[in-house]
Image (cartoon, rainbow, N blue to C red):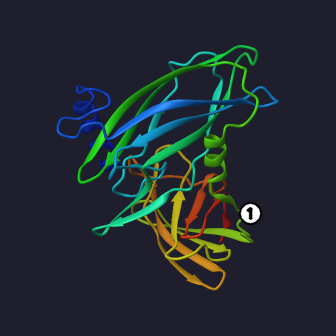
């Protein structure tokens, strides 16, 4: 919560500056829309492409304790009923004792768009609030817009590659079981996730996302014994006080050197 308030304060100061540059920083990131293609059911696959200057990185949806979570405002768009985002598997950065999760060089972020009227073009007008970091960290507000017609039917290579780079599902990652034991604490809950799955390579990082508005999750400590990967962390309400945790809405992502695996929901343990 403190991190989010600090980001909001810095963002208010930063938006008085040009949208693609900060004093003394230049242009660490630019963004545009890749138009993509139309699927047989009428939905459209497109992407937002972020180009990062050398030495800069931006963040995944769960950025780590030192990162800034990205935010998307789609309200300026037209003929748009819903948006789904497919995140490519991110990198884990461990620098100076600080852990962050994200991307460097370029991020192609696939988006699936459901139009209100499938027979008409979709006008995308998106405000992006993201964080970028090098030697310093700077919030950036980017505006991207494009009109997507209905002409293209074949997948475009850049977007198809980004879709293929997503984390494996639990089935694809050979996850046989995922349990979450919750123990009340003064600030919320202590969570212990136990995953029956093969190693994903190297120093595995387990990220737990509550999937509920107003609930935060800490970084986890994890250990492995054979197929059993155990991760422990904390869950709590942003505003403090009591919180109810719905295990079916929890997402657990295991990030390893060889692959990433995303597990939706866990059972009581």
Seen from the viewer's position, the closer of residues 123 and 36 is: 36
Q: Residue furthest left?
A: 24
Left or right of 154? Residue 104 is: left
> Residue 99: which quarter of the image?
bottom left
**Left or right, residue 253 beside residue 187:** right
- Residue 156 against residue 218 in the figure, above or below: above
Residue of label 1: 172
Up the image or down, 221 lies above or below 142; here it is below
Q: Is residue 121 visible?
A: yes
Whether residue 124 is visible? no
Q: Secondary structure at mark 1?
A: loop
Report the side of 41 relative to 123 (left or right).
Answer: right
The residue positioned farthest toward the bottom in the image shown = 225
Q: Quadrant of the C terminus?
A: bottom right
Q: Residue at x 52, y 67 (%)?
A: 206
Give percent across and percent down for residue 226. Answer: 64, 85
- Residue 124, horizontal then vertical, whole percent: 55, 22
Most foreground residue, 37 or 194: 37
Question: Residue 208 at x, y = what percent?
Answer: 53, 60
Q: Going by the picture, which residue comes out furthest to the right?
A: 40
Circle count: 1
**Residue drawn at x 71%, y 69% as measured from the top left:** 175
Tell me the residue at 37%/47% (across/down).
Answer: 68
Q: Position of residue 47 (x, y in %)?
A: 58, 35
Crowd around label 1: few <14 · some 14–19 · many ≥20 (10 Å): few
């Amino acid at each position: 919560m403190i991190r989010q308030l600090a980001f909001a304060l810095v963002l208010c100061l930063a938006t008085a500056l040009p949208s693609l540059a900060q004093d003394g920083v230049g242009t660490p990131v630019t963004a545009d829309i890749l138009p993509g293609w139309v699927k047989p059911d009428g939905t459209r696959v497109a992407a937002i492409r972020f180009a990062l200057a050398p030495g800069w990185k931006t963040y995944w949806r769960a950025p780590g304790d030192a990162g800034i979570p990205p935010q998307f405002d789609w309200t300026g768009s037209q003929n748009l009923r819903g948006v789904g985002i497919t995140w490519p598997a991110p990198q884990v950065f461990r620098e100076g004792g600080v852990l962050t999760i994200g991307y460097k060089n370029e991020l192609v972020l696939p988006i699936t768009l459901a139009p209100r009227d499938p027979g008409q073009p979709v006008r995308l007008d998106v405000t992006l609030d993201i964080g970028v970091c090098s030697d310093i960290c700077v919030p950036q507000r980017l505006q991207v817009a494009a009109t997507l017609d209905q002409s293209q039917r074949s997948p475009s290579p850049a977007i198809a590659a980004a879709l293929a780079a997503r984390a494996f599902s639990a089935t694809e990652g050979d996850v046989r079981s995922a349990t979450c034991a919750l123990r009340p604490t003064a600030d919320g809950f202590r969570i212990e996730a136990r995953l029956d799955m093969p190693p994903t390579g190297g120093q595995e990082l387990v990220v737990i996302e509550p999937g509920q508005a107003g609930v935060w999750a800490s970084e986890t400590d994890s250990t492995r014994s054979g197929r059993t990967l155990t991760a422990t962390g904390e869950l709590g309400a942003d505003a403090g006080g009591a919180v109810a945790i719905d295990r079916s809405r929890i997402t657990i992502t295991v990030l390893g050197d060889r692959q990433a695996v995303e597990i939706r929901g866990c059972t009581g343990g």
